[in-house]
Image (cartoon, coloured by chain):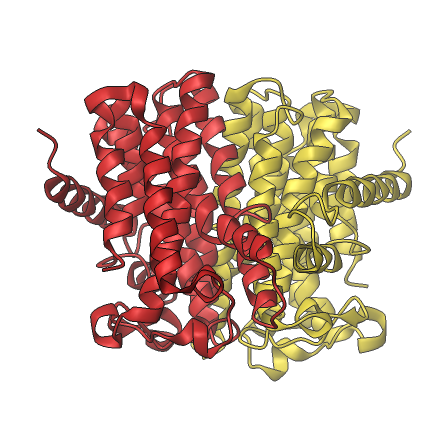
Chain colours: A red, B yellow
Amino acid sequence: MYDFAADIADCARAIETALERQLVPGRLSGPGPAADRLVNAMRHGSLDGGKRLRPLLVRQAAAIFNVPSHQALMAGMAVEMVHCYSLIHDDLPAMDNDDLRRGRPTVHKAFDDATAILAGDALLTHAFGLLADPETHADAAVRIRLVAELVAGSGAGGMAGGQMRDIEGEKGGFSGDEISTMQAMKTGALIRASVRLGAILGGADARALSVLTAYAEAAGRAFQLADDILDVTATAEAMGKATGKDAALGKQTLVAQLGLDGARERLKQTVNEALGCLRTFGPKADGLRATARYFASRES
Amino acid sequence: MYDFAADIADCARAIETALERQLVPGRLSGPGPAADRLVNAMRHGSLDGGKRLRPLLVRQAAAIFNVPSHQALMAGMAVEMVHCYSLIHDDLPAMDNDDLRRGRPTVHKAFDDATAILAGDALLTHAFGLLADPETHADAAVRIRLVAELVAGSGAGGMAGGQMRDIEGEKGGFSGDEISTMQAMKTGALIRASVRLGAILGGADARALSVLTAYAEAAGRAFQLADDILDVTATAEAMGKATGKDAALGKQTLVAQLGLDGARERLKQTVNEALGCLRTFGPKADGLRATARYFASRES
């Protein structure tokens, strides 16, 4: 019987330990205090943090194909490093200007802006190093597909492009379609990449990869919808960061377009859509099912 | 008979055309003005720029092994994108705060800081996408080695780590060894990676890779020495950017340690060291020979 609470806790623990072992001052960047500073900033921006939902998706997709857990962990770390780099850069004064993240000072607050920029750059770079590592998969052809997948999820056509659209969208005037495109790129692309990394590690055939991609795209929309709803309903205390901020900035979200009830209804439909994609997989996809439901439950 | 002037001009032209074809607004990042903005910033930070010395090194190392020119061009573009991303981020107000680069406004001046951060991030990411592309090499095992090589050259253990050391070094107190380590990482690591990318594309054996690596390390030191000498001797007009800046910032360079004459002597020795590594390769290494000499000639 699948246990989501155990799965998410175990994944977070495994990622924490694995990141801790990767980001060792004095090894990653050579000896001396200047080198320590960079690695310590990378650690600050990636350890002790978050629910590790993207590595969870890698591992749950990989579980369908009985991928060895250390392989899913390597790919999960890579996607988590990309996620953490994006948070470090997004928090900068030049971007969202956030002082707090999960109740702790953001990297540029704990260090400085220059160090935060470099720590983000170095985490992004290291992510590709993990995927290139033979420990991630013995077959170079698989590893290079993982690299291409993470590029697609995080670059100009994915997360970075979505972040640019988000900034431009704050100036107002985005249509519902433009908001959806922005969100699909900013948040959705990396969620999509996470699921696909797990499937590629597992040698998924074209048909399995296609339905898992459809699952991931629906799950990504559900995640973003829940986030937008939370931004309206949650208190700052519960979130550990400033809320109502999107509305204050005049960001156009689907909640603004559909209303709160409409957005909740859309969220339910979207989760059902995600679950529908998993029909052929049986109990091995229970992890992915639970995560899609979890994405929706976050908004309450 | 090898013609350096023709080689460097042809390489720069080929890189310019290839980058131009990669960075297409409306394709790379989807349709719409927000997407165009990111790609236009990536173009501003990478087109019309510089001598393309790193792609030249890729191509000259590749020439020893008769690598098809389009393969060297793909890898050269990747390393140039990494170089350009690093310039975009280094120019930011939080880092070197430069308004001009090659006589033109820097990316954050022409756009804004947020766009410059994202454009750098997206160029770095796209570089790995190029190396993962089958056009770069048919064999995935070769492509994944290129990825690992570029990670080593550009990440915490290479360029990004060197930049962190450089910022810390401005606070003073670096020894000669610490300056050398900083420069080997900040500038040397990507030059080293460039030569090795070309050699790996060519299927170099362990011995050839090892002497080419030694060549690249010496060439990188020569490049940095010439740069430090130039910073002291050149006028702002000739450089198209602010000069004497390192001294003004109290940066400790080897010129400060050795004096101008001592630094010039060291530069000569270093170029000879680089040339000595190429003895076994015959006329096919004339490109690499010419570039090492060119690095030294830059200081006059």
Tell me residue B122's x, y (percent): 58, 52
Q: Quadrant of the N terminus of chain A?
A: top left
Q: Which of the pair B156/B236 is nearer the observer?
A: B156
List the single residue furthest toward the bottom. Answer: B248
The residue positioned 75% from the left and 38% from the top of the image is B289
Horizontal arrangement in the rendering, residue B208 relative to residue A73 (left or right): right
Residue B266 coordinates in the image, percent (x, y): 64, 58
Q: Is residue A44 visible?
A: yes
Picture quarter containing residue B21? top right
Figure check: A178 above or below A143: below
Residue A157 left/right relative to B101: left
When asked about the image quadrant of residue B223, the answer is bottom right
Asked whether, in this view, residue B83 is left or right of residue A65, the answer is right
Residues A37 and A158: in front is A158
The answer to whether residue A239 is left or right of residue B192 is left
Q: From the viewer's perspective, is residue A53 above or below residue B251?
A: above
Position of residue A255 measured from the top left corner of the image (x, y, whole percent): 43, 63
Residue A118, given in percent of the width and then of the height, sits at: 47, 62
Which residue occupies 23% across, 50% down?
A20
